[in-house]
Image: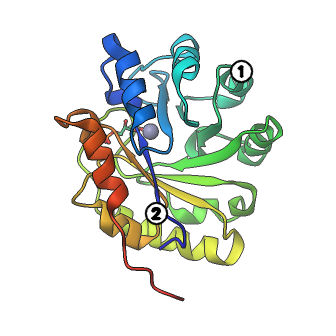
Amino acid sequence: MSKHKHLVAPSILSADFAHLYDDIAMVNQSEADWFHIDIMDGVFVPNISFGFPVLASIEHYAKKPLDVHLMIVEPDRYINQFKEAGADHITVHAEACTHLHRTVHAIRDLGCLAGVAINPHTPVSQLYEIIEDIDLVCVMAVNPGFGGQKFIEGTYRKIRELRALAADRNERLLIEVDGGVNDHNALALLKAGADVLVAGNYVFAAKNPAHAIAELKKITPKLISV
Ligand code: DX5
Ligand code: ZN
């Protein structure tokens, strides 16, 4: 478990794109901490979401950091443009980067937080040599590409493993969990060591999305001193 209060990042992928301003305003006024923005290229994942113009429009109205999750091949080609369009954090997939060390340093050089996402099949050990160079790990709890999928139970073990690795080598590392997060699994995820809960369907399919965000925020795992 992290020593700090956890963060909640609603995933805009599940917003109503015809009324995007309303959903941005809702997140601004809610207890949410970040906007989670999913960029999909139809190559790395079997879906296409949206690109720079939409991101720049979100940035225009968003009053909280933009946590941009790139599900694209060759992300190095575009990180400058994502920064220019308003990204505060840029997360790339370990599976999409041949020179991950170069990529995360290029992201940091732009002044953004550097994140690395790992797919469900990718072991935490893959991050062993890069753990000190990154600010955030996004642990995928579904196979990326779509909102509203079922949470994969093996995620808890991966988060625990990552927390243990980070305890030795990068105490400030933020562990984000993305996919299938809801009010049933959030407490266990925080206890396992997650710092950031991304939630799409749970928030935007709720009758009252701001209330759903507040529900995730108010979970307080008892602090265990270690
Ligand atoms: C999945 C995306 C997620 C997605 C989460 O590929 O990376 O951010 O929007 O949505 P839910 O919470 O509905 O699984
Ligand atoms: Zn995501």
Along the line of sight, which residue is nearer the eye, 74 or 81? 81
Task: Compare marks 1 and 2 and give the one earlier in the sequence.
Answer: 1
Residue 40, image x and y in percent?
Answer: 47, 25
Side of 184 where 21 appears, left or right: right
Q: How is the image coloured?
A: rainbow
Q: Residues within 10 Å of mark 2 (few under 14, many from 20)?
A: many
Residue 193 visible in image: yes
Kindly identify which numbered label has been placed on residue 101.
Answer: none
Residue 84: mark in rendering = 1
| Residue 152 drawn above or below residue 13 | below
Q: Is residue 179 above or below residue 24?
A: below
Please state which amino acid type lies under the numbered disc 2: Ala
Within the displayed image, which quadrant is ligand 2 positioned in? top left
Label 1 CA crowd tier, 10 Å (few <14, some 14–19, many 20+): some
Residue located farthest toward the left when viewing the structure as drawn: 207
Q: CA distance from mark 1 to mark 2?
A: 29 Å
Residue at left 45%, top 85%?
224
The quadrant of the image that shows the C terminus is bottom right
Residue that sits furthest to the right in the current view: 109
Asked whether residue 148 appears in the rendered view, the answer is no
Image coordinates of residue 23 in percent, x first then y, are 36, 24
**Circle 2 — which element?**
loop
- Residues marked 1 and 2 touching at CB (< 8 Å): no
Q: Amino acid at mark 1?
A: Glu
Residue 146 percent location from the top left of the image: 32, 32
Q: To which residue does mark 2 refer?
A: 194
Q: Secondary structure at mark 1?
A: helix
